[in-house]
Amino acid sequence: GDEVKRIPVDAPGDLKHAYFIKVQVLEDDRMIITEGSGVPHVFDGNGKYLFSISAMDASPDSDVFFSEGKYYVITTSTDMNGIIKLSEIDMTSGAIKPGKELKNFITDPRMMVAGEDGIYSSTSTGIFRLNISTCEMEEVLNWNQTDLDRSILDMIRCYPKNSDEIIA
């Protein structure tokens, strides 16, 4: 495709030589740029560094998701228990608020993908949507309902628009 806009990123000194692996552009033109260690950093639409998304007791393990008017990230506690939670992000400071433990969590947090109406994941049994209020994964599609070659299911990543339109 054609280049639409080039934005020079003004990273602070400790990030000048970081290896960045992912860029997300938010609805308000802010950018979340994630470095190789998994730490997401937020920049404004002109590339100026704003803050890093972090918490003392949890590490972000997924893309940042916008749902029901709030920004979220899947986190894993940094203690020996490794509890996986859905945590809200304070998008004025980058602080990760205390989260809610995910119940029946069935996938790698890095495989979670945001759609227009929720957060989705593909597994070897089907496609699931995270219910934000209950923190439970709910089945949207079971692969048994399709004629898909099940031998490749572990390699599939879904890209949902909504619960009715999913590209896998």
Image (cartoon, grey):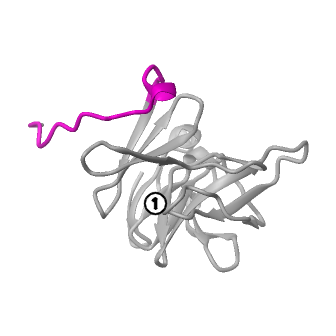
Residue 46 shown left or right of residue 79 in the figure: left
- Locate residue 153, reporting x and y percent: 55, 43
Q: For the point 56% across and 64% down, which residue is it? A: 90
Q: Is residue 33 above or below residue 67?
A: above
- Magenta-span inclusion, residue 144: no
Observer-nearest of 74 and 7 = 7
Residue 59 shown left or right of residue 13 in the figure: right
Prevailing secondary structure class for the magenta stretch in the rendered image: loop
- Locate residue 159, reporting x and y percent: 40, 54
Q: Which residues are magenta?
A: 2-20
Observer-nearest of 105 and 38 = 38
Q: For the point 55% across and 53% down, which residue is it? A: 112
Q: For the point 45% across and 19% down, which residue is it? A: 17
Residue position marked by numbered label 1 in the rendering: 114
Residue 166 shown left or right of residue 9 in the figure: right
Observer-nearest of 76 and 5 = 5
Tell me the element at label 1.
strand
Q: Place residue 103 in its image quadrant.
A: bottom right
Q: For the point 34% across and 54% down, which residue is it? A: 30
* Outermost top residue: 17
Observer-nearest of 12 and 108 = 12
- Which residue type does callout 1 highlight? Ala
Residue 115 shown left or right of residue 46 in the figure: right
